[in-house]
Amino acid sequence: MKKVPAWVILCVIALVAGAALGTTNALTKGPIAEQAAKAAEEARAAVLPAAASFEPITLEEGAAVDHCYQGVDASNNIVGHVVQVTVTGFGGPIEVTVGMDLEGALTGIQCGGSGFSETAGLGAKVKEASFTDQFAGLVAPVSLVKDGGEVDSVTAASISSNAVCSAVNTAAEFIAGLA
């Protein structure tokens, strides 16, 4: 019996592996997108709890924010806005979702995103309530205590903390421009 060349075997293995990966991607693409949409909706509801639903606002090309939504209550009255801004922290991108009421007070923020890669135990603490809860009730611009502001930085994570404050201020400026 004649031996099959090694390159033929490698080609067959590569084709089978490629087909398996392609099929897996096709099967999981929809559920992954659904989970991302659900997580985004939950983040909007968490940062603007007075809203019963959210209506997207069309952004101009080159806008400083990723997404903007108008929050409405059950009576269809506008109660505030939610904006998502992506900034660069120490480890990479941080998606910051910011809620603001009609009086200009922050109603909450959430940090994270699919590309979130801040250092575990340090910069990753910007996702924790002990950091994000400090923003509720504040009026922008916000800054860290070390800069004369009202937000305590995450210990040993000033780059990530500054990035979040920057995102909050960008979101607040954008919302103020909607009025």
Image: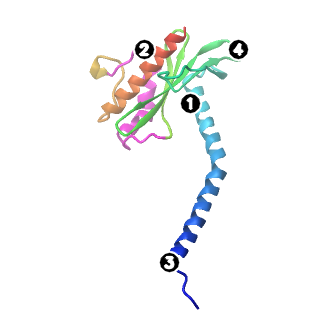
In the picture, measured across the screen, residue 48 lies left or right of residue 166, that is: right
- What secondary structure is found at the residue carrying circle 4? loop
Q: Counting other residues with Cα less than 10 Å from the Cα at mark 3, is it few (<14), some (14-19), or many (20 or more)?
A: few
Q: Earlier in the sequence, mark 4 or mark 3?
A: 3
Q: Which residue lies at the image location 47% right of the left edge and 20% below the top edge?
A: 171
Say whether marks 4 and 3 touch (CB < 8 Å): no
The question of residue 54 being in magenta is answered with: no
Q: Check the image and name the residue furthest to the bottom.
A: 1
State which quadrant residue 52 falls in. Answer: top right
The residue tagged 2 is 140
Q: Which residue lies at the image location 40% right of the left edge and 36% below the top edge?
A: 125
Of the numbered discs in the image, which one, if any, rests on residue 43? 1
Which residue is nearer to you in this view: 2 or 150?
Answer: 2
Q: Earlier in the sequence, mark 1 or mark 3?
A: 3
Of the numbered discs in the image, which one, if any, rests on residue 6? 3
Identity, as a three-letter code, of the amino acid under mark 1: Ala
Q: Earlier in the sequence, mark 4 or mark 2?
A: 4
The residue tagged 4 is 76
Tell me the quarter of the image containing the C terminus: top right
User: What's the CA distance linking mark 1 and mark 2?
Assistant: 20 Å
Question: How many numbered discs?
Answer: 4
Q: From which residue to which does the magenta span run?
A: 115-144
> In x, y percent, where is residue 30?
66, 45
Identity, as a three-letter code, of the amino acid under mark 4: Asn
Q: Which residue lies at the image location 33% right of the left edge and 22% below the top edge?
A: 144
> In x, y percent, where is residue 10?
52, 72
Q: Counting other residues with Cα less than 10 Å from the Cα at mark 2, is it few (<14), some (14-19), or many (20 or more)?
A: some
> Is residue 128 visible from the viewing direction of this image?
no
Identity, as a three-letter code, of the amino acid under mark 3: Ala
Which residue is nearer to you in this view: 152 or 33?
Answer: 33
